[in-house]
Amino acid sequence: MIHIEKIDRLAVSVILFLSIIIAILIWGGNNCTGSLCIVSTKPEIKEFSWQDERVGVEDKAFILTFDRPMNHLSVEKNLVINPPLPGKTSWAGRRLAYTLTNPIPYGETYEVQLESAKEQFRGNKDKGEDIKPFVSQFKSRDRAFAYIGTEKGEEGQLIIYNLTRKQKSILTPPQLVVMEFEFYPHGDKILFSATEKSKGVDAIRELQLYEVATGLNDDTKGSVSPQIKLVLDNIDYQNNGFDLSGDGDSIVVQRINRKNPADFDLWLVKSGQPPEKLNTQGGEFKIAPDGKTLAVAQGEGISLLPLKKDAKPLDFLPKFGRVLSFSNDGSAAVMVNFNTDNAKLRYTRSLVYVNNRGLQKTLLNIQGSILDCHFSPNQTDLYCLLTQLIPGDQYVEKPYFAKIDINTSQVTPLLELPDYRDIKISLSPDGLAIIFDQVLTNPNGSPSDTLTTDSGETIASGRLWMLIPPLKGNSKVAKADLEELPLAGVRPQWSP
């Protein structure tokens, strides 16, 4: 009994001691001092979804996760992003989602800070504790583009230039001449068609498809050591144009049977699977952003087909001759109507906006040409390369860049060009710059020269230019800014 009484007294003492500590912590909060304040009760951020990440335009929002309910207004008021990134906030319990209103500019390091925000304390915003100061960083992808070199010693080679790091890397060996290329979705690889220089006049019939790593966004400062992988050979079939799906999983290639030229078809190439004939013929083609639909020029219109063998059309859009571009989400496209069946519009071309809700909206009619158009990242504008027919006895077209507001159809000229032969344009993924080439031809070129224009002229050299369109709503910038890049090449293309 004596031992039991001692144990009882000890238990009572421990209970009293713990009760006193609990009472002090409850009533004293973070104002307590001494050894009782063992653990801080300040609220804090437990997770930041973009911490130390490298993000691109497909990344629309980041999430902050707190360890307890927070006063929403105090968090939103004190959240700082530097450089600024306009956006909207939304809450789900202890998680804050910050959604960007514009695509993130590339080539930047961003810092996220939060301090002086308060926890939600029993519905009283004045009694909540201040958050533990939070600072974190993330980066956007490097601003970079690839092109085909024309400088001596680089002719026909695929080159990548990292504007953020001012770093140039040659990706292909000198014995290959690159004809076309496309980036994979994250910019880590490039798919390209090429032939050996030794093929001479037969080069265009000897194209094979390859892929090569770019070395972009790997946070290494050394030069790229590219490894080239053969994707599709030319043993039984001649390979012509190709297109890569937005997810990088599918390639469509136009091929001709070497033994039977009448066997002219589109083929589907997927990683780890043998090439599959689609049994689909047509002219120009593009894979829609969903990676499952193929747009093909057939007859007097554009067929939309499932990307599989022997597919029946999902839809047919009559009168259109070309699909210029899809919006990033695949909900819309811009097409060209050559107006062959309209007496009033004969000898004109129309640029038409088409969406998945059945809308077909003519944005402009011109007597010149509609060479190319690209959707802005927020899908409100188009950046186009157009030509204007000059009145006179000779057929002369004056090329120019223009921005077209999809909602109002307003056309804003940006820049006139002296020539437009074989110009290739590319809009940066953040929508802040257009890169294009100026091809210089050699009329005395040899038939064995393998670097040629679409019309077969020998390319002697190429100049690369960057056009910075005026920012929307910025009255201080009255016109576009044009800059010649210190690089010699053709067919430039921005990394995604």
Image (cartoon, rainbow, N blue to C red):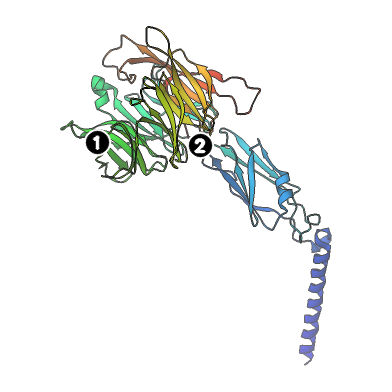
Q: Amino acid at mark 2?
A: Asn
Choose top left, top right, bottom left or bottom right for residue 353: top left
Residue at the spot of label 2: 217
- Of residues 61 and 154, the one nearer the viewer is 61
Relative to 237, say whether 422 is above or below. Answer: above
Residue 101 horizontal/vertical position (percent):
60, 39
User: Quadrant of the image for the N terminus?
Assistant: bottom right
Q: Residues within 10 Å of mark 2 (few under 14, many from 20)?
A: some
**Which residue is the extreme one toward the top?**
393
Which residue corresponds to mark 1? 265
- Asked whether residue 108 appears in the rendered view, the answer is yes
Instruction: Find residue 191 and report its image quarter.
Output: top left
Secondary structure found at label 1 = strand
Q: Amino acid at mark 1?
A: Asp
Report whether 176 appears left or right of 38: left
Answer with left or right where residue 96 lies relative to residue 23: left
**Measured Cα–Cα span from mark 2 to mark 1:** 37 Å
